Amino acid sequence: MLRLEDVGFGQGAFALSADLSLAPGKRVAVIGPSGAGKSTLLDLIAGFRRPGRGRVFWQGRDITDVPPDRRPVAMLFQENNLFPHLDLMRNLGLALRPDGGRLRASDGAAVEAVLARVGLEGLGRRRPGALSGGQQSRAALARVLLQRRPVLALDEPFAALGPALKTEMLELLREVAEELGALVLLVTHDPQDAQRFAEEVVLVSEGVAQAPVETGALFADPPEALRAYLGG
Amino acid sequence: MARLSALLAALAVAGLTLGPVAAVLVRAGGWGALGPGEVQALRFTLVQALLSAGLSVALAVPVARALARRRFPGRGVLVALMGAPFILPVIVAVLGLIAVFGQNGLVNTALRVLGLPGITIYGIHGVVLAHVFFNLPLAVRLLLQGWLAIPAERFRLAASLGLRPWALFRVLEAPMLLRIAPGAFAVIFVICLSSFAVALTLGGGPRATTVELAIYQAVRFEFDLGRAALLSVIQLGLALTAGLVALRLGAGAGFGAGLDRALPRWDGQGLSARITDALWIGLAALFLLAPLMMVVLRGLGGLALLGPGTWEAAGHSVSVALASTALCLLWALPLSTRGGELVGLAGIALSPLVLGTGLFLILRPYVNPFVLALPVTTLINALVSLPFALRILRPEAEAVRADYTRLAQALGLTPLAWLRLVLLPRLRRPLGFAAGLTAALSIGDLGVIALFADPDRATLPLQVYRLMGSYQMEAAAGAALLLLCLSFGAFWLFDRGGRIHAET
């Protein structure tokens, strides 16, 4: 269980509070108006921001003060998920050797296996610039497979892709999450993404991250805040 | 780790600047010791700096205007060439100017043929001439930046209103000049205040001695360290005051990206405007290129006369340049933040001669300072180049941090892996550019080395100066050509090293 216990974060006029629990293995969409704090919520979970009050727990362990790389969380950002001057082997290899050391034969094989898994077989020597946008997203997902973390936090990583490609990536993400048995938190501004992909939705609006609600039930009877956001 | 190295680098800069300053302040005699010589040096320094800055900016106005509104083949090359004086060794330029304006130079030869009286390059004329040679291009680049920053739509509007040239000048160009020119003037004024090598070669005598030159003379010829320290304090006060004023006026002297584009213009299409512009561009190009051509022409004959002393000096220059480049970059990487750039400015505010005098005072009780001529030169060259290196590196270093810090944190990259795999590869281009500038500046530097050198430890610029002093003009020309090739070659090699196969 990922638990945010009475968490509060403030920065100038911006404030976000959250008191909620998320079950392992669930696919959760985080939606809400821009500027409401969706990315901040992910940052608090992934460890890039410290809450002003409250604690964060994973499976009962307090991880509030744990640095990002020691958390059970793998994160994909909106952009800059790959170092553009390193080829895919080295980019993905960093997940196994954060000191940048030479990869062992078994590590190299593991990288090649996950590349093949996401449909990038034989492209290990390419740099990100030599790949299409969709291929870059696949490579970033392949690294998530290597990291084998029980929580995946994604901050609109597919926002720049076209609709067909995005659907494809969400499908791949579902498969990856299933293989890892991971809890997925997907920030999106597209309600369709949420309906297509997520079992539960966390609505972030007016400074509060609401407790998760089952997706179908939420959209069948949207609360006032969601109606305002959807503009319906 | 990053904070610790930044702190260490900042402390080193502070120690190496404040230490010598403290030494100078302690050693300086009271203001009662201020004699007529000091007052005259101070006056000459101010007058020549005012003249140099005023002339540079005034002449830059028509040249920059012509470059802003004309397109012609070679325009890009000419604008790029305007950046070259920055890394041109002073002594090389001086030799070139002597070849054009000196006793037996092109201009005087022509005047003699015409039966007209000759001109002299020594004294205040020569000092101002050399300063204009170095700073006119800088002023042109700063003003050109201003001209190109005027939106093209304004010129289109002016054209559709049919504004006359004078009206267009008053409405569009004069306000820009009022904004940019004071800053450009101030920057050049500050640069000329600390003029040493030009005054050493073309000035001299009681009527054309800058404060910096007087410091050198006090140390080398009069062995009067108290007087040198007093002069250093004067120089310090002068440079800091003027530097702060220049900083307030803020001419953003960048490295001129995008100056090679020409905006479409509708004004100035008349014949007289075309002729005026062509004349100004031609004169500026001639003024900048003729001395360089003369260095090459005269130097080719002198290359055969290069003796072992010159080659040894060249070796010293190259090793000093490589060491000070390495030192400067080692300093610059951890300081490539906003705060760090402020720390680095200390190097620009303090003149090499003042720092040198301070170090001389500190070292003298313990060692013979002359033995340390090359290490001290290395150190001070690195310090003086630091602000330029930081100006080049900081924007890109901050962009790399902004883009990739979170990814590195998410992956748990070790500090060494971050440096080796992310920061250094991403900064390759600016590192190459900064290294090129530092190496070229260091190879061409004729400053603190003159203070410390003995006959066994010359660098190439000093060797050129010594050859000139002993009237071996042909050998001096040969050595100057070698120096020119070394400094431009070093810049080219490093800069290219940063670009080639750059993995972006």
Image (cartoon, coloured by chain):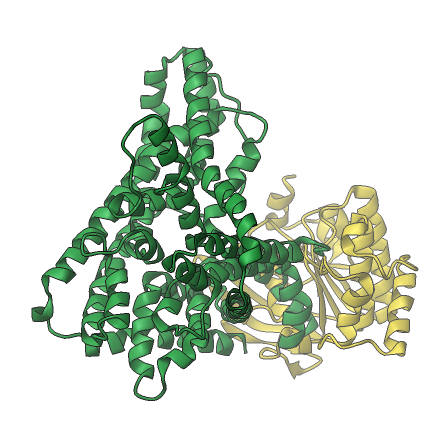
Q: Please state the total of marks drawn on the protein image.
A: 0
Chain letter, yellow in picture: A
Decide: is A24 above or below B183: below
Residue furthest to the left: B32
Can you give x and y, in whole percent of width and height, for residue B275 in the image? 44, 17
Q: Tell me what residue is drawn at x 52 percent, y 49 percent.
A: B299
* Residue A216 in view: no
B97 or B361: nearer the viewer: B97
Q: Nearer the viewer, residue A178 or B463?
A: B463
Farthest residue, direction bottom:
B366
List x then y, in percent, for residue A43. Answer: 61, 65
Quarter-wise, where is residue A203 in the image? bottom right
Residue A162 vs residue A34, the one in the foreground: A162
Q: Position of residue B481 (x, y in %)?
A: 53, 52
Q: Quadrant of the C terminus of chain A?
A: top right
Quadrant including the N terminus of chain A: bottom right
Please tell me which residue is depicted at 40% across the width and 68% down the height of the picture. B449
Q: Is residue A75 visible?
A: yes
- Return the residue nearer the eye: B126 or B59: B126
The x, y position of residue B44, in whole percent, is 20, 52
Q: Is residue B369 left or right of residue B27?
A: right
Q: Please tell me in which quadrant of the rendered image residue B157 appears.
A: top left
Figure colour of chain B? green
- In the rendered structure, the answer to whether residue A184 lies left or right of residue B321 reads right
